[in-house]
Amino acid sequence: MKQTIMRSVAFATCATLLFACTSGNEEPAPVKFSSYSAKQFFETTTISGTSINHDGSAILVHSDKTGIFNAYRYPIDGAEPVQLTHSTEESVWVIDWFPNDDRFLYAQDKGGDELDHVFVQELDGKVVDLTPGDNVKAYFSGWHQDGSHFYVATNERDNKQFDLYRYASDDYQREMVFENKDVMSLNTLSRDGQWLALSKNISNTDDDIYLYNINEQKLVNVSEPDLDASHSAVTFTKDNKSLIYSSDQQGEFRQLFEYVIANGEHKQLSNFKWDARSTMFSPNYGYQVTYINQDAKTVAKIVNTRTGKKVDINGLPPGDVLRVNFSNDEQQMSFMINSDTSPSNLYVYDLGKERLSRLTDSLNPAIDESVLVNSRVVRYESFDGLQIPGLLFKPKQASKDSKVPVLIMIHGGPGGQSRTGYSALRQHLINNGYAIFAANNRGSSGYGKTFYHLDDQKHGEDDLQDIVYAKKYLQTLDWVDSEKIGLIGGSYGGYLTMAGMAFTDEFAVGINIFGVTNWVRTLESIPPYWEAFRKSLYEELGDPATDKERLTRISPLFHADKISNPVLVVQGANDPRVLQIESDEMVAEMEKNGVAVEYVLFDDEGHGFAKKENRISASEAYLKFLQTYLK
């Protein structure tokens, strides 16, 4: 159940108010369109997962069809899906089928506390918690190539770091195969179970890669010496003799490299104009899939490794191809397609017959897809001449003669990226007459390492000016109501929203979704299992022990007296990253100063809202707030 607290304080001094297009007595919009409620948008089904079972007959997914995420079996022949779990309280996040039968693994936490356990559901429906214990966090790390074992990492021994365990696939007996004594991040395993690739954070610009020989219990640093670069191990080659990793060591963008274990040779494998996000192989290595982050879109490059030819699939709808998987015989390829105007749908492609099948129709059938809005990439100049990218969503009813308000939507992070893709929250606001500009301020990933590090130790300052200059850009558009521009953001985006309200007088309203408001407390209270990158986090944001003065200066909580325009705060009570007290105190300070503030608290959510009911309530609150204060 959710707990919703709504507070309003009389607000009579606001000089700029936004107008929300509604179905009341206002003048009709010049363009005909259908208006939908938050409930209608969230009656769309959210689905993810593409694992194909051992005999190639079904795909394992999690879906929120019942209002909370549960596991489902989707037959490849298009027959009706079967619900496999029936949770009513906690979301189920599927991991994988077992290699030789229809048992499956999934993860689950409690109320969004992010302390995931790994579970197995047996063929008879019995569930076994493979990682029991209080305050334990665990994650799946891979299968042995013969299916006899699998690997799980847990922090049960030391809550600051993860050890690796090998589990028997038959009776789940386990043994520790790597004890993490130096706070390393576990990246990937070779399929023969001999090599574990790890990374160690040196600074916020430098990570070293290590290889641990599980058989010989030896650990070796395999990074090139004296090379300051970000590295991450990705996968191993078919013969388990080489490691493939990504690195920005040769330029602005991350490329793929090969490390040959026998002789220590490093080879560059790619030279894209954007970041290579990852790469993977099919079960018998007949296909390789590489994902490229191309200007806020994901481009999947699928190659037949035997012929070297690209796999082209006729009849694909527009959108990003995601989560590609293969059947054991490599005859079936499963994947999802997602776009701004279409939620993720599940597809299967028969590689031999070149036949494409769509297994889901996730969009609520009551919604006319033609009224949904695609983004376009735009770039504008910031205060220092830097070009800032973003995604602009223009409502159907917007025109020079029917100007609309805009919400600048700020992503999380720091270091996240606003990307194309379906968002019920975003489309609901657009459908109700609010343009969205999803900014990628300096510090965002995807635009090169220089751009990524431009906000280091300048948070709430230079990156906030990028948001201010986004407003200036938006004011040049003839269909934008230039006096009606607000902010909305979650997590770090929530922080920049509050910073925009406290440190500038530019924005008419702010919607802060579990945003940081007191950096000193947040950085002192990060979860213990973040220890592997604590140093990097402190180097980017500041160390609360030595940078308290600056962190206080950029924390909105201590400057609440400067906020004058309305704010909505939304928070999950179980959030382990941004504690509830952050929002409680921020709201109290604004109330004390007579600011119009509303507060919505969900007592069964964490850092992000998993339950459909709560996502609907949150979206309804956003729109109601805008209609109240932006008329």
Image (tube, rainbow, N blue to C red):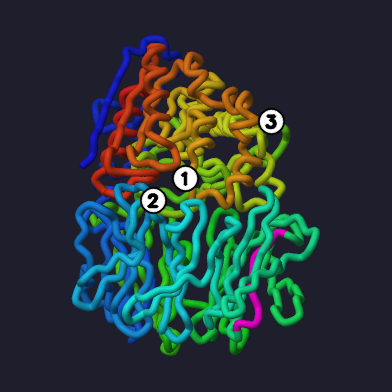
Mark 2: few, some, or many residues within 10 Å (few <14, many ≥20)?
Answer: many
The answer to the question of whether label 2 and label 1 lie on touching residues, with beta carbons closer than 8 A, is: yes
SS of the residue at dot 1? loop
Quick one: 491 or 79, which is closer to the camera?
491
The label on residue 383 is: 3
Q: Position of residue 163 (x, y in %)?
A: 50, 63
Q: Residue at x 79, y 63 (%)?
A: 225
Q: Secondary structure at mark 2?
A: loop
390 in relation to 125, above or below: above
Residue at image mark 2? 114
Label located before the other in sequence (3 or 2): 2
Amino acid beneath label 2: Glu
Question: What residue is drawn where x is 27% and y is 49%?
Answer: 611
Q: Which residues are magenta?
A: 240-248
Q: The residue under label 3 is which amino acid type?
A: Phe
Tell me, yes or no, whether the two marked residues, 3 and 2, touch with CB atoms within 8 Å: no
Q: Is residue 33 magenta?
A: no
